[in-house]
Image (spheres, rainbow, N blue to C red):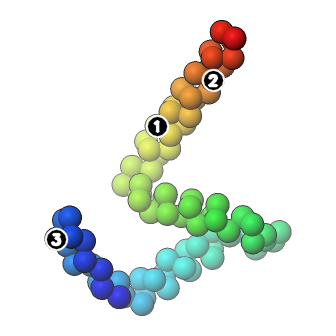
Amino acid sequence: MIDYNEISNELKIYHTNNIEAIWRMLKDAIPKRNRNKDDLPKYLLEQIWCKQNKQCLWNTYIECLQNKYEDIIELIEEYDTE
């Protein structure tokens, strides 16, 4: 499969082995017991997020937690003012 990014003028070629490796990683991340097809999108999004942030996984995770924490604080403050 070939993909051309018009913005960056990059040509990306996807090999079958790479695609199969990604599916294998996803299959390994899904628990062997108590599998549920409703949970598959969650596992897929987790793998995508980890793949995109693999250079600084821990720092990105902490930033996400901090952002979520700030959102929760704002909701609490809004609730307290009402």
Q: Which residue is mark 1?
A: 63
The image quadrant that residue 7 belongs to is bottom left
Please tell me which residue lies in front, 15 or 59. 15
Q: Which residue is mark 2?
A: 75
Ranked by sequence position, the earlier of labels 2 and 1 is 1
- At label 1, which amino acid type do we have? Glu
Q: Residue 1 in the image: x percent, y percent? A: 35, 88
How far apart marks 2 and 1 lie (CA) works out to 19 Å
Ranked by sequence position, the earlier of labels 3 and 1 is 3
Please tell me which residue lies in front, 14 or 6. 6
Please tell me which residue lies in front, 66 or 8. 8
Residue 53 in view, yes or no: yes
Q: Residue 45 in the image: x percent, y percent? A: 56, 61
Q: Residue at x 63, y 74 (%)?
A: 28
Element type where label 2 sits in the image: helix
Q: Residue furthest left?
A: 9
The number of numbered badges drawn on the structure is 3
How far apart marks 2 and 3 lie (CA) works out to 43 Å
Category of crowding for the residue at label 2, using alpha-carbon neighbours closer than 10 angstroms: few (below 14), some (14–19), many (at least 20): few
- At label 2, which amino acid type do we have? Leu
- At label 3, which amino acid type do we have? Asn
Q: Which residue is mark 3?
A: 9
